[in-house]
Image (spheres, rainbow, N blue to C red):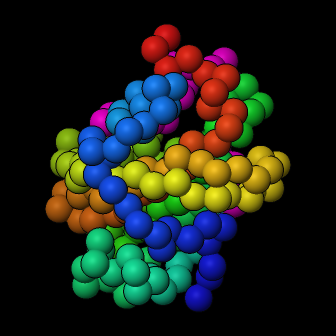
Amino acid sequence: MSIPVISLDTDWHQAQNCSLPSELAPWILEPASLTARLKRHCGHFRVQVLNEQRTTLPVFLQPLLPNTLQAQLREVILWCDDKPCVYGQSWLPEQTITALRPLADMGERPLGDYIFQQSGLQRGSIEVTQLQLTLPDAGSALCYTRRSVFRLNDLPLLVAEAFLPAMAELKAFA
């Protein structure tokens, strides 16, 4: 089993019930595509793939993605103007990958660019926590992290996004 850069095995809370830092709250609570919002706030956007492979779904994630044993783990860093802004971790169940083939090999294409273009997309609630991250090229920091379970044509996928310190340099309301 592959071990992700960060573990999502922690206590999560409903975002709307949390006191969030004012500079990050608009990003954390963004219901639409975080990728699209990031692209609007920087001149150059890119995705760095850290890991993309099929693996066993960790036991602590199984309640979020029921009936899933195997999933594709994808870990990326979203860069804005050569600054690492967001660490993303997605879990795509085997049945989701099988039915939605474009998700199987996203490469450096942002996941958000694909899923938010689909008419059958539904987003579950946004949950939030703080996680200590140590990432290549991004250093170590305590970061606010959000997660949501999406359903695309009734097929589930889990997306978690950690907001790295460089986010402070972006203007959330521009």
Measured as percent of width and height from the top left, residue 145 is found at 50, 51
Q: Position of residue 162 (x, y in %)?
A: 55, 49
Residue under the point 42% across and 37% down: 20
Q: Quadrant of the N terminus?
A: bottom right
Q: Is residue 128 left or right of residue 123?
A: right
Q: In terms of image quadrants, where is residue 150?
A: bottom left
Whether the magenta-drawn stretch holds residue 135 is answered as: no
Q: Residue at x 28, y 78 (%)?
A: 63
Left or right: residue 145 versus residue 99 is right
Number of labelled discs? 0
Report whether 5 appears left or right of 96.
right
| Quadrant assignment, res 6 | bottom right
- Asked if 8 appears above or below 40 in the picture, the reply is below
Vertical placement of residue 15 versus 45, above or below: below
Q: Give whichever of 27, 21 is nearer the camera.
A: 21
Residue 112 horizontal/vertical position (percent): 43, 43
* Residue 62 or residue 103, whichever sits in front: 62
Percent across and percent down for residue 156 are: 27, 65
- For this orientation, the residue located farthest to the top is 174
User: Residue drawn 17% across and 62% down?
Assistant: 154
Q: Is residue 33 magenta?
A: yes
**What residue lies at 23% left-to-right and 53% top-to-bottom?**
124
Q: Which residues are magenta?
A: 31-50
